[in-house]
Image: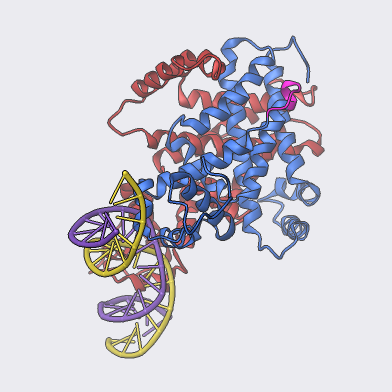
Chain colours: A blue, B red, C yellow, D purple
Amino acid sequence: MVTRAGRPQRRTEALSGERIVEAAVELLDTVGEAGLTFRALAERLATGPGAIYWHVANKDVLLAAATGTVIEAALSADEPGSPREKVHAVALGLFDAIDEHPWLADRLAAQLPRDPWGSVTLLIFERIGRQVRALGGPESSWLTATMTLVSYILGAAGQNATNARAVAPDVKRAEHLAATATAWKAMDPKEHPFVRAVADQLAEHDDREQFLAGVDLVLAGITASHPGKGRT
Amino acid sequence: MVTRAGRPQRRTEALSGERIVEAAVELLDTVGEAGLTFRALAERLATGPGAIYWHVANKDVLLAAATGTVIEAALSADEPGSPREKVHAVALGLFDAIDEHPWLADRLAAQLPRDPWGSVTLLIFERIGRQVRALGGPESSWLTATMTLVSYILGAAGQNATNARAVAPDVKRAEHLAATATAWKAMDPKEHPFVRAVADQLAEHDDREQFLAGVDLVLAGITASHPGKGRT
DNA sequence: ACCTGAACACCGTTCAAGT
DNA sequence: ACCTGAACACCGTTCAAGT
C-alpha cells in the first residue's frame, strides 16, 4: 500500500505497480489515452521507460489495471435501498465514472470482455445480479435479466461518454443538441421520418435522466415478465 | 462505382476512396485492427503509403468509412414483418456483422458516437425508431424507448463480439463456458452468491438466443409502459 | 532485485519531387 | 490531378549493462 499521494520521500519512493497505475490514471485523465506513453509515464515517475516493464508486463495490462482501479473505486459505495435504487446507484456510479474518466469508454466495451468475465466484469455482474434476484422473479430468468441490464448499462454509459467527448469542449452541450435537432428537422421526411419526429425531444433531453429512464425501462421489462411481486 | 473485385485491368485500376476502403475491410477481416497499416494497405494496393492520403484524410476517417460500409451492408435487407420481427432483424444483422468482422466491436462503442449522430448511428436509430413508433405508445415515449433499445443492441453485440474474440480460437466456446461455469461455482458464497447461482445457466446459454432474449426484455419494458396495443 | 537508457522495429503523416 | 518514396517525429518493447 502506498500512502496515497503522500510524502515524496527523499527523491523517489521506489517504483511499484500501484504507483505506476496511479500515475497512468492521472495521465489518462489529463492528456487522454493518446497521451499515455511509456516515455511520458517514465518522465512523470522520474525514471526510464524500461523500468516500468519490470513491474508491468505491457501497455495492455497497464490499461486493464487502470480501468480496474477506477471502476472498483466507483462501485465501492454500497448504500442500502430498494433493488431499483441499488441498480440506479451502480448504474450512476459507472455513468459518472465514465464521464469523469472518458478514456473508460473505450475500455468498457473493448477490454472488460477481452478478459472475459475478468474481475471487473464479475464485480458489476454480481452487484446487478443480486438486485435482479431481489426483484423476485424465477431463478431461470436471472441470467437473461442480469445480462441485459449489464449490457444496457455498459453500452449506454460508454456511448454517452464518447458522445460527450466528441463535442468540442468549448461548445455548450445544449447548443450542440439544438444544432443537431435543427439538422434532424431539416431531413428528408421520406428517408428519416422518425428522426424528424423526435428531433424536439432530443433537444430537450438530459443525458443522465435519459440513461436512468433506460434502466427503468429494462427493469420494467424484467418485472413485466413475472407479474406478482413489487411493481417498481 | 467499382466493379467489385472485378477485372484487374492492366496493372492497377487507379486508386479511389472506395477501393481503399474495400482493401481496408479485407485487411481488417484477415489480420485485425492491428494489421491495418498504411504501409500494408499501400502494398496491397500496389502503391506507396503517401498515395492513400490523397484520397483519405487519415486513419480515423478510413476506419469510419470501413465501419460505415460494413454496417450499411448488414442493414440493407428490409424484410416485412411485425415490429418485433423487424427489430430482431436489425439486431441480428448487427450481431452477425460484428461476429463476422470482430474489429467492429471496438468501433461501435468508440467511433459511432465520435461522429455523434453520424450517418451510421442515424441509420440504426431511424430503423429501430420506426418500429418503436409502430408499437403504438405515446410519442413522448419514443425517444427514450429507441435510445434504450439501440444502446442495448450496440452494447450487447459489441460485448459479445469481444467475448468471442477473447477466447483462443482453438478453444471450443462450449468448453470455455463450461470452464468458466466451474470457476464460478467454486467462488466464495459470501462474496459472489449470485454468480454462483447462475453458473449452471451460463454453461448452457446460447449467445445469440441470449442476445435476442435481451431485445425482447427491452421490448417488454416498452410495451409494459403503455398497456393498450399489441402485446408482443 | 531493481533500474538505466540506448537500440530495434515499427507506426501515422508529410512533402518535395515527379508524371 | 494524381502518385512516389524518402524523411520526420514519434511509438511499444527489449536488453545489455549497471547498482
- Residue at image coords 41%, 60%: A47
- Provide residue A3's location: percent of width, then percent of height: 56, 44
Dominant SS in magenta: loop
Q: Nearer the viewer, residue A29 or B69?
A: A29
In the image, residue B63 sits, relative to residue A201, either above or below, namely below
Question: Is residue B130 visible in this depiction of the protein?
Answer: no
* Mark count: 0
Q: Left or right? Give the position of A156 relative to D11.
A: right
Q: Nearer the viewer, residue A54 or B106?
A: A54
Q: Is residue A102 magenta?
A: no
- Provide residue A154's location: percent of width, then percent of height: 59, 37
- Provide residue B95's location: percent of width, then percent of height: 49, 36
Toward which corner of the image does residue B11 lie, by quadrant? bottom left
In the image, residue A145 sits, relative to residue B149, either above or below, namely above
Q: Left or right? Give the position of C7 relative to B163.
A: left
Question: Is residue A209 visible in this depiction of the protein?
Answer: yes
- Residue at image coords 30%, 34%: B169
* Span highlighted in magenta in the image: A78-85
Q: Left or right? Give the position of B59 relative to D14.
A: right
- Provide residue D2's location: percent of width, then percent of height: 37, 76
Toward which corner of the image does residue A178 lie, by quadrant? bottom right
Q: Nearer the viewer, residue A79 or B19?
A: A79
Q: Nearer the viewer, residue A16 or A207?
A: A16
- Residue at image coords 81%, 38%: B140
From the image, which quarter does the C terminus of chain A lie in? top right
